[in-house]
Amino acid sequence: MQDSQLGSDYFLRVSVKGGGCSGLSYNLDFDNEEKKGDQFFEDHGIRIALDMKSFLYLAGTELDFTDGLNGKGFAFNNPNASRSCGCGESFSV
């Protein structure tokens, strides 16, 4: 979506949910409602929200966008992950 379609009230919500082949999976959504306990960050003009539980799993994580031979998509570089699956969409601590 283009910025004009989302509006300035929207932000990127990054979270961790149970599931995936390694036990925990990453989740990305657009949101426009702040929740109690949300932690907010801003990078390159993009507001990013994490709930407190997800923040504990993702502290220090870098979120990159890759555009390589293996396809386009987001890549999580999570220093807290002791193991991750081959597709990079789930992890364990």
Image (cartoon, rainbow, N blue to C red):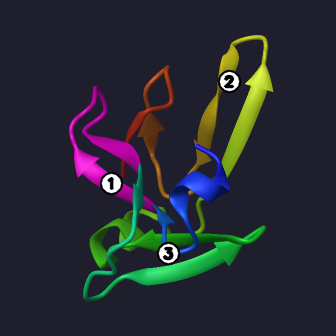
Label 1: which secondary element: strand
Label 3: which secondary element: loop
Question: 15 or 33, which lies in front?
Answer: 33
Q: Position of residue 27 (x, y in %)?
A: 38, 47
Farthest residue toward the bottom? Answer: 36
Neighbours of disc 1 within 10 Å: few (<14), some (14-19), many (20+): many
What kind of secondary structure does the magenta stretch mostly adopt? strand
Label disc, if present, on residue 9 of the rendered structure: 3
Among the 4 quarters of the image, the one containing residue 74: top right
Tell me if 84 is positioned left or right of 43 in this view.
Answer: left
Which three-letter amino acid code belongs to the residue tagged 2?
Lys
Which three-letter amino acid code belongs to the residue tagged 3?
Asp
Q: Position of residue 91 (x, y in %)?
A: 39, 40
Q: Which residue is mark 1?
A: 16
For the residues labelled 2 and 3, the Cα–Cα distance comes to 27 Å
Tell me if 33 is positioned left or right of 46 in this view.
Answer: left
Question: 46 or 16, which lies in front?
Answer: 46
Span colored in magenta: 13-28
91 shown above or below 15: above
Which three-letter amino acid code belongs to the residue tagged 1?
Val
- In this view, the mark in front (1 or 3): 3
Q: Position of residue 32 (x, y in %)?
A: 38, 70
Labels 2 and 1: the sequence-earlier one: 1
Label disc, if present, on residue 72 of the rendered structure: 2
